[in-house]
Image (cartoon, coloured by chain):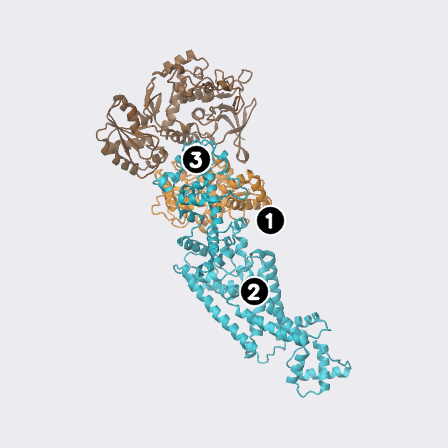
Amino acid sequence: MKYAYFPGCKIAHHLPAHGKSVEAVCAHLGLELHKPEFSCCGYPVRQESRDASVYSALRSLALCARLGLELMTPCKCCFGNFRHALHQVGHDEKLKLRMKDLLADEGLDFPETTRVRHFLQVLDDNRSLVEDAVRRPQKGLKVACHYGCHALRPENITHFDDPFAPTIFERLVALTGASALPWDLSLECCGYPLRGRDETISGLLAARKMAGAKASGADVLATACTYCQLQFGGENHHPDQSIPAVLFSQILGLALGLEPKRLGIEPGEAWVRLAV
Amino acid sequence: MKTYDVMVIGSGFAGMAAALFAANRGLSVVQTGATGGIDFSTGFIDLLAVHPIAEQKVWEDPFAALAALRRDLPAHPYCRVSDDEISLALQEFTNFLGQHGLCYRGRDKKNTLALTSAGTLKPTYLLPCTLWNGVEAREKKANTLIVDFHGLKGLSARQIAEVRKDWPNLKTARINFPGMGGELYPEHMAWSLADPARRAELAEMVAPLAVEAQYVGFPAILGMTDTSIVLRHMEELLGRPVFEIPTLPPSIAGPRLRAAFDRGLPGLGVRTCTQKLVTRAESSEAGFHFTAGSGSTSVDISARSAILASGRFFGKGLKADRHHIHEAIFDLPVTQPENRGRWHRPAFFDPQGHEINQAGLETDAGLRPLGADGKPFHPRLHAAGAILAHQDWMRMKCGAGLAIATAYKAVASL
Amino acid sequence: MDFFSIGLTLACVSAAGGALWRVRTWFLRGKAFAKGGNTGPGVFRRFVGGLADVILLRRTLRDGPARWTGHMLLVLGFLPLIFLHAMDDVVTRPIFSAYEPTLDPWQFLRNLFGLISLTGLAILAMHRITRLKHESIAQDWALLAVIGGVLVSGFFLESFKIMSPGDFTRMTDDYFPEAESEELLALKTYWARENGVRFTIFLPTAPEITELGAQLHEDRCAGCHAPTATAFVSRSMTALVPSSMNIADQGRTVLWYAHVALAFIALGLLPWGKFFHPVATAANLLVRGGSRTSSAGNSSFSSGLALDACTRCGQCSLHCSVAPIHKVLGNRDILPMDKLLDLRQHLDGSLSPTGTAALVEGSHICTECLRCTQVCSAGIDLQDLWATSKKVLTEAGRAGVDGEIRKSTAAEWARDFSSRNLGRIGSTGAGLADRAESFWGCVQCTTCTGVCPVVAVSEDPSRDLDLAPQQIMNLLRMGLKAQTLGARMVWSCTTCYKCQEHCPQGVPVADILYELRQLGADNLRKKEGRA
């Protein structure tokens, strides 16, 4: 399987471990990743301008179309914005014409058929591949799955999983041998979108989620989105960090028997000791 | 493509119950439906309280009422299910909810009068356990304090006290909800009580007001997915029995039910496609093909049999144009008043109800809806819940019970 | 004082004074970024890495061979010209005792280096014209023009000197004063034929005279003057002047002034804009020591230097992740190259209010993707400059659209917005908030508010958020859009889409809130003069 890999802007500087672990896992599973030079998915600028956001997304999709590949991103916000952009041009003929003009300026065709997949969906599509490749089942690791809003909702646009009772994350955690615990706030927002906008509410949302995950008895809060991970861990140091936030790609990488270093896991990250 | 044993169309009481019963019987189940039905539920499981509607006769024994109904209204869907089936259905349904943190309670073969937010009494068969102490308190006319909150619109303790003149020992108090101000919404208050420290704060504010009270009542805000824990903790903190009173819809009862099913059904292997309405349906000898949702995000579903639990108008199971009422998915014939002029009676609150609220599908004994030729439309298509004709569940106070019982019957007849 | 001395003095004063002024800004601007010390790889590795970047132009090579080749040729050709030719009195003559500019190899090398430089410059000019036309500003063209002018005028000057009979006479007056008129005629004949001097008098062709000329040339000239054929470019260029035109003497004088003046201009302009990049960029590459990532906490000096090291090569803007956003919004400060320019002006306090607004928008649209830092030929830690300047701007009260909105209350915005024509969303105006169908289903059931996590965690929603989601829907339904645009709920929406997903009536609540923010941003842009 080949995919056009869309890492998203934040990985290179702010969360290189996400890119590293996703690429290591894909390489190990034989999922080939192509890396054209993409631009921004348009998510961050969606607050400022609809047209700029839609165009930014379509430009990257047009690059995929030229390669004839599906786009795969490990970021839920990138994923969501690609889906939104396609939805918007699909429902606004005038917008579509304007976008076609802008793309033509750059010598690109409108991406009529490009499919957008999230990393979790790609893994789910290749379940048997993952299942056969697990060498070190992470038995004993209890995981609280954090779904990430922009892939999950609104379902009629993102088409990720059931928006009220999703199961894809738990299914994939089960493949690694770890156990996914049920908890009440798994579908709630991490609060990252309000970083730099309303720090108080952003902090409260994150704290509430982490407290909930901790109370569920989980060892780690698992994410599958660059922004969510940045909010719970990464550069955001929470004074009351009660539960470590871990990228699912790292948990899976360990289960596949990959070296922690290849997955961007720093020596001394406490949760790794919980993993087998 | 996977072919499921059953496709359940709808996610109200009937749809949820049908998905549950089918999954419990080891069938592979896929379910579609939008939010709406169960989200606006009061949380009560009515079986049957009023019959005949025109006389507004209220029954204490719902099974006696059922017997009368079956005698008077042979076309009523309750005539398709036996008392035993109804009891088994309710038991299985409430067992499931109990496992997911929503305990239900009632009296054997007897309706219970439950206190509403308006202070009136509503006869119902099963009610959330968190309400039960309130039933006892009212029946004993015990010294009771009902607390309400500044900023919460859904319940006024003083109004309840004014209406319930027959309960002189009822005291009321209005306090600020700890940690929140301005306009309050039940769901947020309930989530915040997941924190034991918040409960202690609340208890501290209530305790001095409840010195003489034997019981303390709150608006229904005591927890979201952990109501029994929150209730027990509040009782410990206050040293006396505590109960909830449902607030005006949309109350917390809907989200609590929704959360229980959202957690429980995928665990039973049910594939849920929430927020997707069926946009295309085809049937053949072998079974059914559906498309749910539209455009690029639609999904195709194959199933050997199907249960139509899509509700009436609010659930979008039936659609009305200027002249006629249509069934939305298979375009099944809908029993309805002859013309639009007869849909409604002149007075909106006419105790006899409106003709349009009897509209719906005709079925055979196995709850298979009838086609235009009067024969079952498809050998493995069944219907359950509000979409069935000849019942006005709202006025007969039989909504949830009818939905659960017919879902049970539909699954049993598969 | 003659023209040359005055010009040289002025150029040197301008270059030295300006350079000092430029270096001063490295300290001053850096202070706006004052932070802790620098951390990075070890000193030796940094030195080697930095030197390799400077000498081999390694970072330029990343962008493909064309620009690297052009730049490498220009440097390899132009540096010897500066030292061996322009500064021959202080460099070449003291080292090589027999140096004469008219002797080989110098005469030949001058042409060779000149040709190499011109080739390099031509490649760079083509690159800029084909790939960077829209990104380029006056100083980009000015640098190309001045360097090109120096080179071309030099070639023409030499070419005219070769043809000039005046120069011939000056030489013979100096070096062969005792010449008989016959001897002079013979020498002229020889030089006209062999070395391309253009005399206006008739010259004999008799073999004995030619013979004599060759003999005299060997005796009196060849010791200090190589055949002009080794000035292979200049000599060939004489063909450009028709033999009927007798302008060599006048032309030679004009071109001398032109060449010298251009050289002085180049020297004098050294501290101006990108003319300084040979100094600033090289210094920055050394300080960066070969690093291609970003390190937070650069020292104030290295930040100040980084701010000054841009060569305007355009790579950052060509590869910028948010370039498509610039394409739609048109604000040049979205692209790194121009943003850096305006950031410098902002730090110097000379940026106009409109410019500052554009800078603030550009600063907030940047997604900090690191790519500009990775592709920067000058090795500038742009990532750190963007992160820090965003912080500095925010602390100065310029926090982008969101920050502007939060400066006034919802009521104040309601007054402001209701007095203007708000327009519609995006280019097509297909806004949900303007369509009655969007709200038809709303029954004010408060489900959206009930599931909203922002309302849930706010202490007092009516105080902290102004309006609950369902109240916003209700106001929009009544056509009171201006009343909603400043509400905190609109701007503190965390975009989780729970409201929209849970709405039993299918009202696209979250999409509408998104739209309101877009509309607010549109109107702020208009207000700040960036429609």
Q: Which chain does cyan denote in the image?
A: C
Q: Quadrant of residue A222?
A: top left
Q: Under tag 3, what secondary structure?
A: helix
Give the quadrant of residue B405: top left
Q: Is residue B221 visible?
A: yes
Whole-percent x and y of residue C87? 55, 75
Judging depth in this view, the residue of C441 and A193 nearest the camera is: C441
**Disc 1 to disc 2, C-alpha distance:** 30 Å
Instruction: Say few, some or many: other residues with alpha carbon within 10 Å of mark 2 (under 14 / 14 to 19 / 20 or more).
Output: some
- Point out residue C360 in the picture as x, y percentages from the top left corner: 46, 53
- x and y, in percent, of residue B205 in the image: 26, 36
Comparing marks 1 and 3, which lies closer to the viewer?
3
Disc 2 is placed on an element classified as helix
Image vertical order of residue C523 relative to residue C509, above or below: below
Residue ID for mark 1: A105
Label 2 sits on residue: C143
Q: CB of mark 1 within 8 Å of CB of mark 3? A: no
Based on the displayed image, in which of its 4 quarters is residue B406 positioned?
top left
Label 1 neighbour load within 10 Å: few <14, some 14-19, many 20+: few
Q: Determine the colour of chain A.
A: orange
Q: Which mark is residue C474?
A: 3
Task: Indicate the secondary structure of the residue bearing disc 1.
Answer: helix
Which one is in front in this view, the residue at disc 2 or the one at disc 3? 3
Q: Amino acid at mark 3?
A: Asn
**Dot 3: chain letter:** C
One can see residue A218 in this view: no
